[in-house]
Image (tube, grey):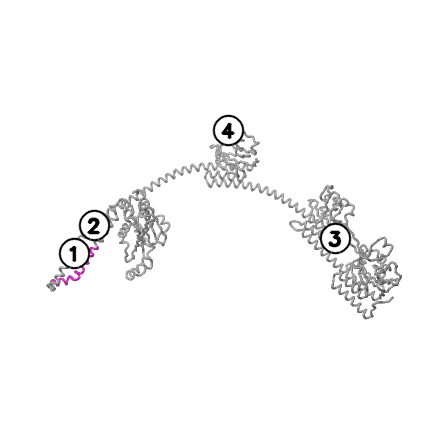
């Protein structure tokens, strides 16, 4: 046998170290087993110079699959992904691979096989690396030739659990090298390949540990998610937990059945029982229930093919219409009591196996495999096997679901108890609230009766409260004396019975006698009650289906009836409602008695008030008469005095006034003669000269005409005053006639001129007259002059009094300066403003008299027209001036007199009278 690609010793040592180094680095760098295996076959092929290096992995059924492969220049066909039957490798060879870790080297050309066990099969001790050759089985030679192999090397790969030192290794797979040409394998190459296989075993162990860790992590995460859903308060999320569990088991459906409540939660594919079975839910079928009774607490049952289970032969019919084949059943118990069942479904699927050559079992037992052409085998109705970790997860979830269902059951029991308790509390609360409401209504009615004594209002309040409280359609009060309804309260569109009279034949006198003895009539159904026909027809005509009647007794007699009507349907009247209506009837009786007493009191009070008003009116008339008498007497005396004085003065004044012009002429003539004497006799006698000098003749001649002129002016003034007195008194004009009011105002100002002038303590009052173009007015001139006199006199008094003496004192300091230098006052000049206007239609005259005095308060302004009210000091006012003025303007002339004033803003009197009275003015 010859060697191919035989390296020298140094190069081979370097290749061996590099190969192991790369293998170790790859295992440390990557946790992906497939990547490690792919790198391994590639490096080994380069190391050996082989045509094909592959990793062959055993399955649980003994068959195997090529899961990693490296081929040089396609010298041999690829076997990657192809499966080989279990009997391709005899059982005895498998045992040697496992127990002795035997390596085999086949030389096809010479028909020999070299065996190199790593350890003793009997003792397990390591052996020296030796290769023992013997003749190989011809079938094996033909098998290899069919694959195109001339030389092969097989090294077993064992799988050991590093966490369990005492655990026996398993035959995981084989590391196989194939040559299309003969090649001799050296001991050191075999040793290197054994080291590579050991590194692969380490990588497999790491991969298994990683897979176990990830599986455990996923399992714990699933348990945590399910636990969170199952113990989420206040509502257990059973549906969400079911979906999470089905997903964790890679199921296509599942269901959770709770025995006590018969609740069913489903998700995904579901079985359907045939119509011939009694129950629509599979968990309620007797066969299923009997099967569940056989399970003990904590048992988990799983099958990958439910159609192969004999006890599910009948129930399997429910799964025929689905793709479900795998089934896991987790019976749930709580303290050994069956409380439900959790079922997980897995669907069937089709698989395709790629065989290295066609598998024919009969021929394989007799002849070796002669062709490795790819052959596809289809398998239907396959299902994933339930793994131990699936069962472990199911056992972990068993406790959580059992506790969650029990918690939900207890929670519902507590909810039911709470609901029942809440219902009882609500019922008792309703009764208490109803009683409280009745008490409240009684209190409201009682307070209403105490608050108001109006009879009709109280009765209306009673029927309104009763109707709302009883929730009836109509409540009325029937007065027996009137034989009719006097108040009502209606809910809805029912007809009004207000004022309806009861037929006398329907209610005999014995009814009144019974009601006076406290009879209460409760009629739940008018159609079936024992009533006379007249009474029934009358109630039906009022649309009454049920009625409740209580009497209203005032003392020993029945005043009326308090009646509740139900018009929609018959009604069973409750004892509480009857008692309430009876109490309200008693309150109505109290209200009626109080109303009757109140009515009597009101009548007596009205009579007393009428008498008091009559006395007050008489007293007012007496006061007005007294005021008029005083004013008339005063004005009469004043008028007579003024007239007498004017008459007495008028005669001498007229004499003086008539002779002053002649005296003036005579004086001028005498002075002219004296001038002529001085002209013609310039040198008079000494006695005459002395007399002229003694009397200051020149001054006398100059001053005498001035004296005469002054006397003329004085007589004119006296004559004007006399005329003003005569005009003011108007003794010759007592009747109503047309006059010029401007003349009356001017005469009043002339009479009061002495009060308008200033003095050392008072700067005087400025009068501003703003006269309009007014017509002559038909009025009582003397009375109008009196009004002007009173208002202007009050204005002068207000301006003189002011708000104190400070302004007068300070203004007095500037009086002299103002008189000679027109100095300005520190305070405004006292002023009276008089304005007259006529309305736009020339029917009414407006006179406004205002001053800039201190004004008056609202309280004073309200009383200024009251008789005998004055704000002046004692002895300076009678309090009759403005009262008489108001009477003259309003009553005598049919006009308006108002006062406008504010403190600090002066006072204005507004007088409005018709130009021509609409009717005769009452004197």
Q: What is the distance, in whole Å, between disc 2 and disc 3 at their CAs?
A: 148 Å
Viewer-proximal residue among 256 and 393: 256
Q: Is residue 32 left or right of residue 858?
A: right
* Residue wearing tag 1: 665
Nearer the camera: disc 1 or disc 2: 1
Quadrant of the snapshot with the N terminus:
bottom right
When the figure is inspected, residue 709 is found, relative to residue 631, above or below; the finding is below
Q: Is residue 435 left or right of residue 249?
A: left
Q: Quadrant of residue 81?
A: bottom right
Residue 300 shows in this picture: no
Question: Residue 505: which numbered mark, if any?
Answer: 4
Viewer-proximal residue among 759 and 500: 500
* Residue 703: % across, % down: 18, 60
Chain-order first, disc 1 or disc 2: 2
Q: Secondary structure at mark 2?
A: helix
Which residues, given as a range, are shown in magenta? 688-713
* Residue 912: % across, % down: 33, 48
Q: What is the distance, in whole Å, between disc 4 and disc 3 at their CAs?
A: 93 Å
* Residue wearing tag 2: 650
* Residue wearing tag 3: 390
Q: Secondary structure at mark 1?
A: helix
């Amino acid at each position: 046998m010859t060697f191919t690609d035989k390296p020298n010793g140094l190069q081979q040592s370097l290749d061996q170290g590099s190969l192991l180094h790369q293998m170790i680095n790859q295992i440390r760098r990557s946790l992906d087993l497939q990547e490690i295996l792919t790198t391994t076959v590639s490096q080994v092929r380069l190391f050996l110079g082989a045509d094909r290096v592959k990793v062959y992995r055993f399955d649980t059924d003994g068959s195997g699959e090529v899961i990693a492969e490296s081929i040089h220049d396609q010298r041999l066909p690829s076997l990657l992904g192809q499966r080989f039957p279990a009997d391709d490798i005899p059982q005895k060879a498998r045992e040697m691979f496992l127990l002795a870790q035997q390596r085999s080297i086949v030389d096809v050309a010479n028909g020999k096989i070299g065996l190199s066990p790593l350890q003793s099969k009997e003792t397990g001790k390591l052996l020296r690396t030796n290769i023992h050759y013997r003749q190989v089985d011809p079938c094996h030679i033909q098998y290899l030739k069919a694959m195109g192999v001339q030389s092969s090397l097989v090294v077993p790969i064992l799988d050991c659990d590093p966490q369990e030192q005492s655990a026996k290794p398993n035959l995981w797979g084989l590391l196989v090298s194939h040559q299309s040409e003969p090649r001799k394998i050296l001991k050191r190459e075999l040793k290197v390949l054994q080291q590579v296989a050991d590194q692969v075993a380490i990588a497999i162990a790491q991969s298994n540990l990683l897979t176990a860790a990830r599986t455990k992590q996923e399992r714990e995460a699933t348990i945590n998610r399910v636990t969170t859903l199952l113990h989420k308060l206040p509502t257990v999320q059973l549906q969400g937990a079911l979906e999470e569990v089905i997903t964790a088991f890679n199921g296509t459906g599942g269901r959770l059945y709770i025995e006590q409540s018969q609740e069913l939660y489903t998700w995904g594919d579901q079985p359907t029982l045939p119509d011939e079975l009694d129950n629509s839910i599979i968990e309620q079928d007797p066969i299923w229930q009997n099967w569940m009774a056989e399970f003990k607490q904590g048992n988990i049952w799983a099958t990958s093919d439910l159609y192969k289970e004999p006890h599910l032969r009948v129930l399997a019919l429910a799964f025929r219409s689905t793709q479900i084949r795998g089934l896991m059943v987790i019976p749930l118990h709580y303290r050994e009591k069956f409380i439900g069942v959790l079922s997980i479904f897995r669907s069937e699927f089709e698989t395709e196996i790629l065989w290295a050559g066609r598998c024919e079992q009969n021929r394989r037992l007799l002849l070796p495999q002669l062709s490795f052409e790819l052959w596809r085998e289809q398998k239907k109705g396959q299902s994933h096997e339930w793994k131990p970790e699936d069962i472990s997860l199911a056992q972990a979830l068993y406790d959580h679901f059992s506790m969650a269902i029990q918690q939900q059951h207890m929670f519902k029991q507590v909810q039911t108890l709470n609901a029942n308790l809440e219902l009882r509390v609500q019922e008792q609360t309703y009764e208490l609230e109803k009683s409280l409401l009745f008490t409240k209504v009684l209190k409201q009615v009682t307070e209403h009766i105490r608050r108001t004594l109006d009879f009709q209002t109280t009765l209306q309040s009673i029927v309104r409260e009763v109707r709302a409280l009883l929730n009836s359609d109509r409540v009325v009060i029937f007065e027996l004396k009137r034989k009719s309804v006097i108040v009502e309260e209606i809910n809805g569109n029912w007809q009004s019975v207000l004022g309806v009279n009861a037929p006398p034949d329907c209610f005999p006198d014995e009814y009144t006698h019974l009601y006076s003895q406290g009879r209460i009539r409760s009629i739940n159904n008018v159609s079936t009650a024992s009533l006379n026909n007249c009474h029934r027809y009358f109630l039906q005509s009022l649309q009454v289906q049920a009625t409740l009647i209580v009497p209203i007794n005032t003392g020993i007699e029945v005043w009326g009836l308090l009646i509740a009507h139900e018009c929609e349907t018959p009604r069973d009247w409750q004892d509480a409602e009857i008692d309430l209506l009876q109490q309200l009837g008693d309150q109505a009786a109290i209200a009626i008695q109080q109303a009757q007493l109140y009515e009597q009191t009101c009548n007596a009070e009205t009579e007393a008030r009428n008498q008091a008003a009559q006395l007050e009116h008489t007293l007012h008339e007496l006061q007005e008469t007294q005021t008029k008498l005083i004013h008339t007497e005063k004005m009469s005396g004043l008028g007579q005095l003024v007239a007498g004085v004017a008459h007495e003065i008028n005669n001498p004044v007229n004499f003086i006034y008539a002779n002053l012009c002649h005296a003036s002429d005579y004086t001028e003539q005498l002075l002219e003669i004296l001038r002529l004497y001085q002209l013609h006799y310039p040198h008079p006698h000494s006695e005459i000269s002395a007399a002229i000098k003694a009397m200051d003749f020149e001054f006398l001649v100059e001053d005498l005409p001035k004296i005469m002129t002054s006397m003329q002016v004085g007589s004119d003034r006296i004559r004007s005053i006399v005329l003003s007195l005569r005009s003011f008194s108007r003794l010759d004009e007592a009747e109503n006639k047309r006059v010029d009011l401007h003349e009356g105002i001017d005469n009043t100002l002339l009479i009061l001129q002495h009060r308008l002038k200033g003095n050392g303590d008072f700067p005087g009052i400025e009068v501003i007259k703003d006269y309009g173009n007014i017509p002559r007015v038909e009025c009582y001139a003397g009375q109008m002059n009196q009004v002007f006199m009173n208002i202007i006199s009050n204005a002068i008094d207000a301006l003189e009094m002011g708000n104190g003496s400070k302004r007068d004192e300070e203004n007095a300091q500037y009086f002299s300066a103002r008189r000679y230098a027109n100095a300005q006052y520190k305070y405004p000049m006292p002023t009276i403003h008089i304005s007259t206007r006529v309305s736009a239609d020339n029917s009414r005259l407006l006179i406004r008299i205002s001053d800039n005095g201190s004004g008056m308060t609202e309280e004073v302004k309200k009383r200024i027209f009251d008789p005998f009210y004055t704000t002046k000091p004692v002895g300076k006012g009678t309090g009759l001036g403005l009262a008489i003025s108001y009477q003259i303007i309003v009553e005598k002339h049919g006009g308006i007199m108002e006062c406008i004033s504010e403190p600090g803003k002066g006072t204005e009197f507004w007088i409005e009278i018709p130009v021509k009275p609409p009717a005769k003015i009452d004197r």
